[in-house]
Image: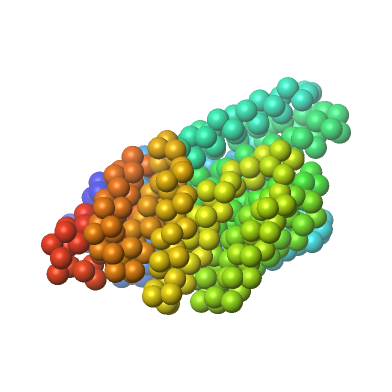
């Protein structure tokens, strides 16, 4: 039962209860669900929404920490307003459409800040705030965000998400303080950036609904601050969430909205990042001509970019990342045409993997697993085995739910060569890793 709770496998939790004589009616009464919902979960339907998981834990008398829901209810309400059960279990495609509509409205200039609560708008902080704030207070938020982002970047969102959430809860108090107009604008920027990090770390540990909530709020703050580059950043990150969940159409729409803001920002590097991600989305849609077009534009914009003048959030995009993104686009195309694209994906990912520092462990897992997968697709089994094992070694050091998902293609490709004992061993090692 503890293993099932740690995985947030509610289906298995309910099955364990049924094996010990607890009826569906009793489960429904305890968790506040209908018997039909309990039945669907028993059949395998996943539960991902934070507030529903929390309600199930509380209803069954389970410590929230067993399910990785260890922060208290008051904090949860402040930073990611709980929706009712109907909203939480709303169809994922509806949520995607709602977010896209919200993103389009904000990006195109609609006045949405301060309007009625949406499905992702957190409630206001209720604890006392300083009467007046200055630029030093804002800089403290920025410093905290930078330090926490560095932890996420190195070791994964699981190392810092709760800290980001706690910092955000405090930082939002400052909205009730008085300040000069320049300080107010920078506060909006700082809160947008911190919400964006909260969204990214939530996504990294597998909490999709809180991620969407934070990204939606980040978008509003960035627009209120008239920071087009930051708007582009938030849309890029939410698009990446949808790419991860194999929804390239929705991702592409968000990247295209982000492209509007990126061009308004005047930053060629920002435009390059959006172009690179559009190329990846087109790859997942099996549109090689569009991939080549966007890769070409990415290279052109990157060549024009002046990193010293680029916004802070986009400076991560170096030549290493350029190769990594091109490799990702060809990796997506290799699913449909491995003979043509697997070798290109290998060549591009080798360039970035060899240049990244050993401390960038999550990035190493992603890059090495992609490289190993395409070694297998290209027929170089021995190299695939060697690189695949390195990816696993890094994966064991990272607290990120995305790692298991990104290793799935490697598991599939190694599984195609199970006549080879080493490939069979790697297949089993990856499979066990993904199940833990």
Inspect this view and state whether residue 318 appears. Answer: yes
**In this rendering, position of residue 171 left or right of residue 285:** right
Inspect this view and state whether residue 26 appears. Answer: no
Query: Residue 229 or 158: which is nearer the viewer?
Result: 229
Query: Residue 34 or 83: which is nearer the viewer?
Result: 83
Hey, which residue is sitting farthest right in the picture? Answer: 181
Residue 65 position in % (x across, y down): 36, 39
Q: Residue at x 82, y 58 (%)?
A: 109
Query: Residue 159 or 77: which is nearer the viewer?
Result: 159
Query: Residue 275 or 171: which is nearer the viewer?
Result: 275
Question: How is the protein colored in the picture?
Answer: rainbow
Q: Residue at x 60, y 60 (%)?
A: 276
Residue 116 position in % (x across, y down): 73, 55
**In this rendering, position of residue 397 left or right of residue 120:** left
**In this rendering, position of residue 201 left or right of residue 41:** right
Count of picture labels: 0
Q: Residue at x 43, y 75 (%)?
A: 340
Please tell me in which quadrant of the rendered image residue 13 appears.
Answer: bottom left
Residue 332 position in % (x across, y down): 46, 68
Residue 389 position in % (x across, y down): 26, 50
Q: Name above or below for residue 199 compared with residue 385.
A: above
Q: Residue at x 72, y 44 (%)?
A: 306
């Amino acid at each position: 039962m503890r293993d099932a709770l740690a995985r947030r496998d509610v289906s298995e939790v309910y099955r364990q209860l049924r094996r010990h004589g607890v009826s569906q009616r009793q489960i429904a009464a305890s968790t506040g669900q209908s018997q039909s919902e309990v039945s669907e979960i028993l059949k395998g339907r996943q539960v991902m929404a934070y507030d529903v998981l929390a309600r199930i834990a509380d209803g069954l008398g389970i410590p929230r920490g067993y399910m990785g829901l260890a922060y208290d209810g008051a904090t949860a309400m402040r930073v990611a307003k709980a929706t009712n059960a109907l909203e939480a279990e709303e169809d994922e495609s509806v949520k995607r459409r709602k977010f896209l509509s919200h993103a389009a409205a904000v990006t195109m200039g609609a006045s949405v800040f301060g309007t009625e609560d949406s499905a992702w708008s957190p409630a206001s902080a209720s604890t006392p705030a300083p009467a007046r704030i200055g630029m030093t207070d804002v800089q403290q938020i920025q410093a905290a965000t930078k330090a926490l982002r560095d932890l996420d970047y190195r070791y994964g969102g699981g190392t810092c998400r709760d800290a980001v959430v706690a910092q955000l809860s405090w930082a939002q108090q400052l909205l009730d303080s008085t300040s000069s107009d320049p300080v107010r604008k920078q506060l909006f920027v700082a809160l947008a950036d911190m919400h964006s990090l909260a969204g990214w770390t939530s996504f990294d540990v597998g909490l999709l609904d809180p991620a969407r909530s934070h990204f939606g709020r980040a978008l509003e703050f960035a627009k209120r601050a008239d920071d087009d580059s930051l708007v582009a950043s938030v849309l890029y990150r939410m698009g990446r969430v949808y790419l991860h969940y194999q929804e390239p159409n929705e991702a592409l729409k968000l990247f295209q909205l982000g492209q509007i803001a990126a061009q308004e920002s005047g930053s060629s590097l920002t435009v390059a990042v959006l172009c690179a991600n559009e190329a990846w989305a087109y790859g997942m849609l099996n549109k090689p001509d569009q991939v080549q077009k966007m890769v070409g534009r990415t290279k052109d914009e990157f060549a024009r970019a002046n990193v010293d003048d680029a916004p802070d959030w986009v400076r991560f995009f170096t030549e290493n990342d350029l190769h990594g993104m091109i490799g990702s686009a060809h990796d997506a195309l290799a699913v449909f045409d491995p003979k043509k694209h697997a070798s290109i994906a290998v060549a591009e990912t080798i360039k970035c993997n060899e240049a990244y520092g050993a401390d960038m462990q999550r990035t190493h897992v992603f890059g090495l697993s992609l490289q190993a997968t395409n070694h297998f697709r290209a027929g170089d089994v021995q190299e695939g085995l060697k690189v695949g094992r390195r990816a696993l070694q890094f994966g064991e050091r990272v607290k990120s739910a995305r790692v298991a998902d990104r290793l799935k293609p490697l598991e599939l490709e190694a599984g195609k060569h199970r006549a080879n004992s080493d490939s069979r061993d790697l297949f089993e090692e990856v499979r066990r890793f993904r199940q833990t």
